[in-house]
Amino acid sequence: MFHLMPYRDLPSDFDKHYQSAYIDPVWFDVADPDKVGQYYNWTLDELIYAANAGMHGLCTNQHHQNVYGFMANPSLMGSVLARATQGQNVAIIQIGSTLPSTSPPTRIAEEYGILDCLSGGRLVAGFPRGLPTDATISNGVVPIDQRERFDEALDLTLKAWSAKEIFAWNGTHYQLPMVNLWPRPIQQPHPPIWIPGSSPTTVEYVTERDFNFAHLSYAGAKNAETLGDYYWDTVTKKGRDANPYRLTFLQLVGVSPTDAAAEEYAPHVEYFYHKLLHTPAYYQAIPGHQDYPSMMRQLKAPLRERPDTSVMTYKDFVDRGFVITGSPATVRDQLVEAVKRLRIGHLLTLLHFGSMPHELCLQNIDLFTREVLPALEDLWDDEWEDRWWPERLRAKRPMPAVAGGEV
Amino acid sequence: MAAADRRLNLWQGKVETQVLVQGDGPPLVFLHGPWGLRADGDFIGRLAQTHTVYAPKHPGTTPGDPDAIYCLDDWLDLLVYYGELFDRLDLRAPAVVGYSFGGMVASELAAAMPERVGQLVLIDPLGLWREERPVTNWMILPEARCRQALFADPEGEVARGFFALPDDRDARADAQADMTWSLACTGKFVWPIPDRGLKKRIHRIGAPTLILWGEEDRVIAPAYAQDFAAPIRGARVELIAGAGHLPHLEQPDRVTALVHDVLRA
């Protein structure tokens, strides 16, 4: 289960007052710190509840200066989850800390080392590059350097995790005289690595390195055909196998007892798309964030369409497949179809979104894990081994499953 | 005299640079701003009436070599690179005219290598920072606000032309790419705050200096003109009425007259 930890009680006219969910909302004008404390606790409670209900993985993520989701340091959340799920068959999926905006990045290598030790080898090490607003505005990273810093930081992290000798690092962006990381992860040479992305350059990078590619789309599986095709074409071209577990996909899901009852998600879906995703291009498409080939692709033949979600209603989001809501049977059928069509090995389910109250989130988790998850768990297992999952969990669960984990 | 393009191979063969060369007379280097050279043709033509103008594209913005930008890491690299470019063009001490980002580069070259800049014209240059009047971050502005920041008359012909894009889909994408990549490449050296410590070095400038500033510059307030002038001995300041951040585009007659005036001296 994936969680963004959003601000759940924005005023109804928030999107009229602010051009952007990022950067612009001033804390003292919008936020109540006691409420925010409650959100962090609910978020952790919901994820722990999901683990107890049978979810296979719990996902946290890093964002800054916004109302959309503000686990500013996901390792803090991940460490609570690792501790609370001690001994359980559930992965701690950090997807994750943003290397280019942390200096030196060995700080993240250490935090992930702690999480892997603390969880008993249950870490999935996700490495997002970071949204432009996060990396370049909140953290001051030079836009055109972001990718280069990421590449160098990940190389440094991988070496720091497994090097048997103390080494010096003389890079373009980082210089360290003596690297001898404490602690190192249990999983050697490194935990499974998942990289979120949507650009051709990231697809190629991830495929070449044989990492897991995580497409964290909010447009739904129905609209992921172009990128899915591009991804699997690249996998074929690079001579990689068609193992579905190399692909992760995020989907908003709302399960209710009946199709009619699923209307209960309507205000929270609209809140999510209208208020939380209300971020203009001038903040999210800062010049240099995309490298030249990806920028040209975006201008001439985009892999990802960006529809105007501000004018769409709940019905539109459902009809156009942005969200999958309904009875367990409806959700199950749509997810099984999507998973097979896109060859998704790991399905991240966003079971909390927008203004959804705590109780509704728990119902969603309950119905999902009981009625939907069993149909997804073993879809690929007779044919493929999940090489992007913690080894100790693979052994314990011969037929791996997910929800914020894998299918 | 018609403009011609020269292509230089610099920086251990890793950076291709297109230099527009136009005119006849003493050498003048023209350094463009964050948005590229696209709109500067007319002004370069005016300078070329009395000078041989060399207008290089900043590293990474030369068509066909976008990855060149990854071969220079920082501000020091950029200055040394421009020293090399001057050498390659055999320019001993040319006049240097730069606006915005190009003005910042020109200031630093004149401060770091005073003997290599004969005369200096700074048009609304970046490079200094006032806490109470921060420079507007031009890289994260929506077009409407960018237009207001750059031009005294945001709805005027010049402003509209500056952002105009071709109708043809491919040509349109190329034009957008040219501007976006130019912002990205120049931004590499100044993000997130366009202050690389020039205030510690600016007193080294020895060239006769003219500082021009659009009275309605809403990227960098005209008050900065005095901050530039104060440490430079004999610097002359002229504020340009009816102009924003790009006075050479909005008031080309006035700017050209002032530049010619100082270059003749």
Image (cartoon, coloured by chain):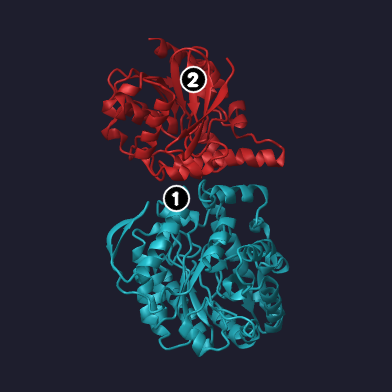
Q: State the CA–CA distance, disc 2 to disc 1.
A: 32 Å
B174 lies above or below A154: above
Residue visible at 40% across and 81% down in the picture: A119
| x, y percent for residue A30 | 45, 60
Do the residues at pointers 2 and 1 share their chain? Answer: no
Identified by mark 2, the residue type is Val
**Which label number is shown at residue B178?**
none
Q: Residue furthest top?
A: B265
Quadrant housing residue B82: top left
Comparing A85 with B12, the one in front is: B12
**Marks 2 and 1 in Cβ contact (< 8 Å):** no
Q: Which residue is mark 1?
A: A145
| x, y percent for residue A161 | 37, 70
Q: Quadrant of the C terminus of chain A?
A: bottom right
Tell me the element at label 1.
helix
**Which label number is shown at residue B53?**
2
Quadrant housing residue A77: bottom left
Residue visible at 44% across and 58% down in the picture: A150
Residue B125 in view of the camera: no
Near mark 2 (Cα within 10 A), the count class, few <14, some 14-19 or many ≥20, is many
Figure chain in red: B
The tint of chain A in the picture is cyan
Identified by mark 1, the residue type is Asp
Q: Is residue A224 left or right of residue A55?
A: right
In the rendered picture of this protein, how many numbered marks are placed on residues? 2
Comparing B137 with A232, the one in front is: A232
| x, y percent for residue B71 | 44, 43
Q: Label 2 marks which chain's residue? A: B
| x, y percent for residue A43 | 47, 75
Residue A270 in view of the camera: yes
Tell me the element at label 2.
strand
Residue visible at 52% across and 68% down in the picture: A211
